[in-house]
Image (tube, grey):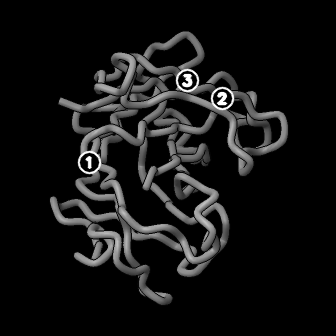
Amino acid sequence: MPAAEFELRVKDFAKVQRDPKAYEIVIVRSDDVDKSGGKVKVVRLDHSEYAKPGAGLTTIQIEPNSQDHVTLRFTITDGEGKAGRYFPIGVELRRADKTKPIGIPITTHAKPHVRKELLAGKTEPEDTPWSPFSRLKLNEPLYTLEFDVVRLRVRAKTDPEGRRSHTTYRFAIFIQEPISGVVRKIDPEIENPY
């Protein structure tokens, strides 16, 4: 079972690529994790520095005290939360801060393209495609997108002083309207904690 489930509500399919208000993300369910002072949700929504101007809460933040990996599931719905009008056909991931490598691969199997050194917090590879994303599932069940995010234990080279607590990824979901065959792209963000 996913650690968190979302609805990606498409309010205006024609404008979804140009207008960040044409869609919204809603948390349907999220597991709890222990944190000093009580329990908190595994994920929360916020507004990141990389969000498009005028965007609402489109940044998915993963709780730093969560498990080593979390599974996220998105159901693509219309503006009223009903599935069936659109389905996901692809995913694009890239680093929001544009440090290299910018493009991030995602696998469909259990092991992400991550070096053991990254998971242990020892080093960040130079221009080598690596990724904390794995187990991609499209339309299993229909109208859903699901994947795992592995928590990395290394800070980006762009943050040598350790001012940041996460890496932000642009996360584009390509959706298709079955009736017309038209494809659109929605691109929120994911913050992966160190």
Residue 128 rendering spot, x and y as whole percentages:
42, 86
Residue at coordinates 34% horizontally, 77% vertically from top-left?
122
Q: CA distance from mark 2 to mark 1?
A: 23 Å
**Badge 3: how crowded within 10 Å, few (<14), some, or many (20+)?**
many
| Residue placed under numbered mark 1 in the picture | 69
| Residue placed under numbered mark 3 in the picture | 9
On the rendered image, what quadrant is the C terminus found in? bottom left
Q: Nearer the viewer, residue 188 or 137?
A: 188
Circle 2 — which element?
loop
Residue at coordinates 77% horizontally, 45% vertically from top-left?
52
| Residue placed under numbered mark 2 in the picture | 57
Residue 107 rendering spot, x and y as whole percentages:
28, 64
Q: Quadrant of residue 39?
A: top left
Sequence-earlier tag: 3 or 1: 3
Sequence-earlier tag: 2 or 1: 2
Dot 1 amino acid type? His
Asked if the residues shown at circle 2 and circle 1 are in contact, with their CB atoms under 8 angstroms apart, the answer is no
Q: CA distance from mark 3 to mark 1?
A: 25 Å
Residue at coordinates 76% horizontally, 34% vertically from top-left?
55
On the rendered image, what quadrant is the N terminus found in? top left
